[in-house]
């Protein structure tokens, strides 16, 4: 089967994405108790931050956010405006450092109002899809890339987290760019500023230290010690401001009365619990994502010496550590979502469609 051109692959993949987005707007069904109405509770804080950065007073911004959620949200649509104030909401200790998404959303909110908060997530979703196609082009495996795009766009989990007014999609987009840089293994002078910028912006998007350390471990497995050291240094340096905050409440919040030492001891238990709940939810809600996750793990283990496997396995483990630190079950694979670009890389690098066969044969 002849490979399609890059242009054709982009048209097909973006067409699949836009069809998925259109169907989500038309049929955002309130199923299994989840709110598919596009406005997630975390978004109220990001919306409030964006409006205040644009010059609105806390009072005006809070009233605007509360009114918006009253009209558009299915759950938590009764927000006390004063609960959003910086001095009243304890979540600002952590959320106050997440400046990337609110800052990037400012021009779109200025043009479109509160709906503008969905533009960065939509662009991030496009970056994910285009990045997967570019990976397919790099490995001359565009049919597999298109297949991965289709699988991800029909996944309700991916659609849920990539199309809400929150930081998840932006972090996935940054991870996609870094994955493409790593997969190309380019030896150029721009590697340091590109990677450092991605890590810096990602660190001010959401807690992502373990994600970047996963990439550093991948470079270590590839014996690229200098690049591994650079990622370690930049990621730890970007995380440094958080050390001056009282972030203990964000670590295993269900163990509020425990010390950090006790929480560290309980982290493996939390990781196991989160893995169980995430996988159980995928069994019920999203068998498509569960299937491609299982296949990617099997392929990565079977091709353990492959380049993508050296990154996929440590990054997936570190993302599950991130989920364990949060310790809140029932978030439906949210904290592991940045694995998607690396998962796509595993498929594209290792599942080959033989180009000259009459029938499409795949080989691992």
Image (spheres, rainbow, N blue to C red):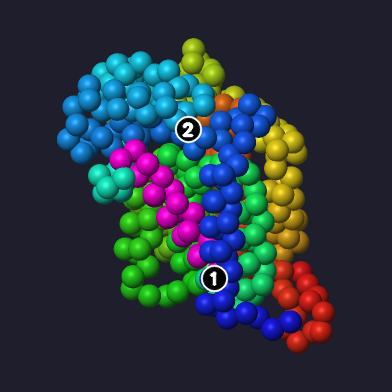
Task: Pinpoint residue 268: horizontal percent, then vertical percent.
Answer: 62, 31
Name the residue rendered at 78%, 72% in the picture.
362
Is residue 124 covered in magenta? yes
Q: Local crowd at mark 1 within 10 Å, few (<14), some, or many (≥20)? A: few
Magenta highlight on residue 138? no
Which stretch is magenta?
Answer: 113-133
Q: Is residue 213 above or below residue 324?
A: below
Judging by the rendered image, the residue that carries numbered circle 2 is: 40
Residue 251 coordinates in the image, percent (x, y): 48, 26
What residue would you read off at disc 1? 11
Q: Quadrant of residue 96?
A: top left
Inter-mark Cα distance, 1 to 2: 30 Å
Rendering quarter of residue 350: bottom right
Query: Relative to residue 47, is residue 313 drawn left or right?
Result: right
* Residue pictured at 28% horizontal, 37% vertical: 50
Q: Are marks 1 and 2 in contact (CB under 8 Å)?
A: no
Helix, strand or loop at mark 1: helix
Q: Position of residue 276 (x, y in %)?
A: 71, 33
């Amino acid at each position: 089967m002849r490979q399609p051109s890059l242009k054709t692959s982009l048209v097909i993949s973006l067409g699949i994405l836009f069809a998925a987005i259109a169907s989500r707007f038309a049929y955002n069904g309130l199923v299994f108790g989840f709110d598919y109405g596009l406005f997630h509770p975390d978004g109220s804080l990001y919306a409030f931050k964006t409006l205040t950065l644009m010059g609105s007073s806390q009072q005006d911004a809070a009233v605007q956010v509360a009114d918006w959620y009253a009209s558009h949200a299915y759950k938590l649509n009764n927000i006390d405006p004063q609960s959003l104030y910086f001095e009243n909401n304890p979540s600002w200790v952590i959320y106050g450092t997440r400046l990337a998404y609110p800052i990037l959303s400012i021009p779109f909110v200025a043009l479109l109002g509160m709906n503008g908060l969905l533009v960065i997530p939509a662009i991030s979703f496009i970056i994910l899809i285009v990045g997967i196609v570019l990976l397919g082009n790099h490995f001359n495996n565009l049919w597999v890339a298109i297949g991965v795009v289709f699988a991800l766009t029909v996944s309700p989990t991916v659609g849920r987290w990539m199309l809400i007014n929150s930081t998840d999609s932006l972090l996935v987009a940054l991870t996609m760019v870094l994955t493409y840089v790593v997969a190309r293994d380019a030896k150029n002078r721009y590697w340091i500023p590109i990677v450092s910028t991605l890590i810096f912006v990602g660190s001010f998007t959401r807690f992502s230290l373990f994600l970047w350390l996963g990439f550093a471990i991948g470079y270590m497995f590839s014996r690229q010690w200098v690049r591994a050291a650079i990622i370690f240094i930049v990621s730890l340096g970007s995380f440094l401001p958080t050390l001056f905050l009282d972030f203990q409440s964000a670590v295993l919040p269900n163990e509020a009365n425990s010390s950090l030492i006790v929480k560290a001891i309980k982290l493996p238990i939390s990781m196991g619990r989160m893995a169980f709940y995430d996988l159980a939810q995928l069994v019920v809600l999203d068998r498509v994502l569960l299937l491609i996750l299982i296949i990617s793990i099997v392929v990565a283990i079977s091709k353990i010496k492959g380049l993508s496997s050296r990154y996929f396995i440590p990054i997936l483990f570190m993302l599950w550590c991130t989920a364990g630190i949060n310790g809140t079950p029932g978030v439906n694979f949210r904290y592991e979502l940045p694995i998607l670009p690396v998962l796509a890389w595993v498929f594209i690098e290792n599942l080959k469609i033989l180009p000259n066969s009459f029938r499409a044969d795949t080989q691992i």
